[in-house]
Image (spheres, coloured by chain):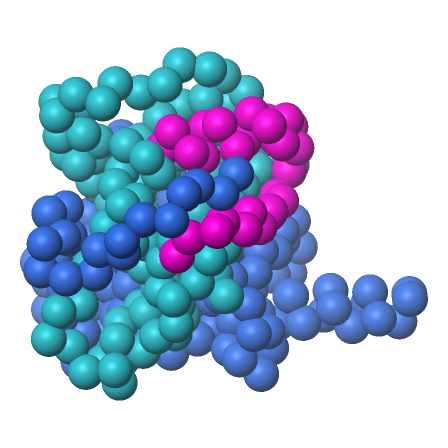
Chain colours: A cyan, B blue
């Protein structure tokens, strides 16, 4: 399982991918897609009420800044491999707990990432 | 899978923070919202990840599969056809881009977002109505599946 390059150009390459398009195609036929609505945002200066709103179901929970696209794609690839998910697996989801805050959902700091495959596309987001 | 404890970066030092479009006041969106939709050719079914209303599920997202040749499948196809006519291209998949915005990936690889669509407000509103209906179709199918599971259990 090849670790994506940590070079700035690798990160820049991922950041140039448009929302909803593939970040990486995995060996088992699954495709990691970019979902901007779950990416880190600048919460500085926002009221608690606004943070709840910006991380709600309709806006999407958000990853912390430590989860840049490189880490996001590499983690999904590694976890998908551990779970032995492929394009033949069908729709499936799995929660992974962390001992650090991974994101914010409905205004709360959360420690769990949900990885979802719809049978073809993979994405992940923080959940309570 | 957990890592070591590190300071959380939420502040303006967020280097890679993305710009989230301002809320689309013209089209205030509420769940159920289609999060991601595509047609799985192998199973001949639409796979819809959707954001359910809280009364249907507290989860952020749920997934349903709807056979292409079912009544709901045909309703989905009609809605997609209407969106395709409005946007001018064959849609490969569509997704929620947050708040009142949606993205569309065309068969030729082009990507377009509702907020970028150069069209009349009436045309955008028409697309939005189709998207709302897709979300509702998904949620009703999910609810029916839950009822069937409960009856079987």
Magenta segment includes B11? no
- Residue B48 position within the rendered picture, expressed as x and y whole percent measured from the top left: 52, 54
User: Which is nearer the eye, A55 or B152?
Assistant: A55
Residue B142 in sight in this render: yes
- Residue B80 position within the rendered picture, expressed as x and y whole percent measured from the top left: 40, 54
Residue at point 53%, 80% (across, down): B54
Q: With respect to residue A20, does B125 lie above or below? A: below
In the displayed structure image, the side of residue A34 where residue B43 appears, left or right: right
- Residue B103 position within the rendered picture, expressed as x and y whole percent measured from the top left: 27, 52
In the displayed structure image, the side of residue B116 where residue A109 appears, left or right: right
Q: Quadrant of residue A37?
A: bottom left
Magenta segment includes A95? yes
- Residue B145 position within the rendered picture, expressed as x and y whole percent measured from the top left: 73, 64
Q: Quadrant of residue A86?
A: top right
The stretch of residues the image draws in magenta is A73-101
User: Which is nearer the eye, B74 or A58?
Assistant: A58
Residue at point 56%, 60% (across, down): B62
Residue B132 in sight in this render: no
């Amino acid at each position: 399982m090849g670790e994506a390059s940590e070079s700035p150009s690798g990160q820049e390459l991922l950041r140039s991918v448009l929302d909803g398009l593939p970040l990486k195609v995995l060996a088992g036929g699954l495709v990691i897609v970019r979902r901007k609505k779950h990416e880190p945002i600048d919460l500085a200066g926002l009221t608690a009420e606004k943070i709840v709103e910006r991380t709600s179901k309709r806006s999407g929970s958000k990853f912390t800044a430590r989860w840049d696209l490189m880490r996001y794609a590499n983690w999904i690839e590694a976890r998908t491999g551990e779970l032995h998910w492929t394009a033949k697996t069908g729709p499936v989801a799995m929660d992974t707990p962390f001992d650090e805050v991974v994101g914010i959902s409905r205004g709360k700091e959360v420690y769990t990432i949900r990885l979802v495959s719809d049978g073809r596309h993979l994405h992940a987001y923080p959940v309570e | 899978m957990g890592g070591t404890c590190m300071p959380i970066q939420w502040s303006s030092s967020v280097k890679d923070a993305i710009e989230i479009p301002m809320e689309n006041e013209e089209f205030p969106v509420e769940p159920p919202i289609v999060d991601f939709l595509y047609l799985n050719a192998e199973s001949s079914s639409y796979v819809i990840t959707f954001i359910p209303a809280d009364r249907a599920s507290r989860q952020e997202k749920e997934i349903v599969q709807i056979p292409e040749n079912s009544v709901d499948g045909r309703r989905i196809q009609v809605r997609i056809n209407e969106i395709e006519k409005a946007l001018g291209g064959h849609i490969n998949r569509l997704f929620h881009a947050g708040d009142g915005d949606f993205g569309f990936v065309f068969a030729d690889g082009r990507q377009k977002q509702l907020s970028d669509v150069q069209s009349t407000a009436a045309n955008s509103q028409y697309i939005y109505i189709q998207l709302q209906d897709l979300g509702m179709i998904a949620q009703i199918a999910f609810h029916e599946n839950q009822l069937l599971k409960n009856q079987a259990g």
